[in-house]
Every structure is written in structure tokens, then in C-alpha cells.
């Protein structure tokens, strides 16, 4: 239950309409862009980072992760 989105004391969907679900690759590219623009080193987060490194090595999946 820890990874659920809660609103008004009940778990809710994070996307209200089906066409707003992002792909894993979209999320990864946004994280890399944020790291590049801010100069943040994602390796400081270790395994909790959305991607292992800003190079994007490893995860080449573009599918949904729902």
C-alpha cells in the first residue's frame, strides 16, 4: 500500500483519463533532462533513482510499466 496515491483517505488512480499514462521511456527521458538542466548527479540516489545514470544505459524498454 505504500506506493498508492491517496486522496481523501482513499487510494485513487494517478491518471484520471486513460490517454495520460506515460511510458517508462518518457519518464526516463524527463528524469535525464531534469538532471542535465540542474547539474544533478543521479548516481547520488543509488538504486532509488528512476534511472541508474544520466547516460540512460541499461533500460531501453519503451513499454508501459503499469
Image (spheres, rainbow, N blue to C red):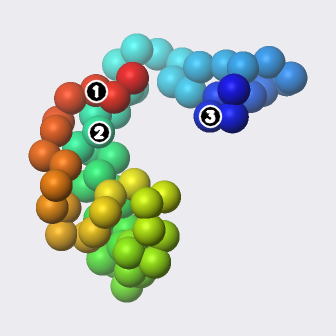
Q: Is residue 55 left or right of residue 43?
A: left
Earlier residue among tags 1 and 3 = 3
Task: Look at the image and tell me in which quarter the C terminus lies.
Answer: top left
Earlier residue among tags 1 and 2 = 2
When asked about the image quadrant of residue 13, the answer is top right
Residue at x 28%, y 34% (from the top left corner) = 23
Query: Residue 28, which numbered label?
Result: none
User: How many numbered marks have been drawn onto this rendered protein structure?
Assistant: 3
Q: Position of residue 55 (x, y in %)?
A: 18, 69
| Eye-nearest disc, 2 or 3 | 3
Q: CA distance from mark 1 to mark 3?
A: 17 Å
Badge 3 marks a residue whose secondary structure is: loop
Residue at numbered disc 1: 64
Task: Look at the image and tell me in which quarter the N terminus lies.
Answer: top right
Residue at x 43%, y 60% (from the top left corner) = 47
| Eye-nearest disc, 1 or 3 | 3
Q: Position of residue 30 (x, y in %)?
A: 32, 56
Residue at x 38%, y 75% (from the top left corner) = 43
Can residue 5 be seen at all in this image of the molecule? no
Residue at x 39%, y 54% (from the top left corner) = 50
Query: Residue 24, which numbered label?
Result: 2
Q: CA distance from mark 2 to mark 3?
A: 16 Å
Residue at numbered disc 3: 3
Which residue is nearer to you in this view: 46 or 41?
A: 46
Q: Position of residue 33 (x, y in %)?
A: 29, 66
Amino acid at each position: 500500500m505504500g506506493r498508492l496515491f491517496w486522496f481523501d483517505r482513499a487510494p485513487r488512480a494517478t491518471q484520471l483519463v486513460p490517454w495520460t499514462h506515460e511510458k517508462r521511456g518518457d519518464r526516463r527521458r524527463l528524469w535525464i533532462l531534469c538532471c542535465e538542466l540542474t547539474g544533478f548527479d543521479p548516481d547520488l540516489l543509488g538504486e532509488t533513482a528512476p534511472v541508474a545514470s544520466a547516460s540512460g544505459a541499461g533500460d531501453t524498454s519503451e513499454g508501459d510499466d503499469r
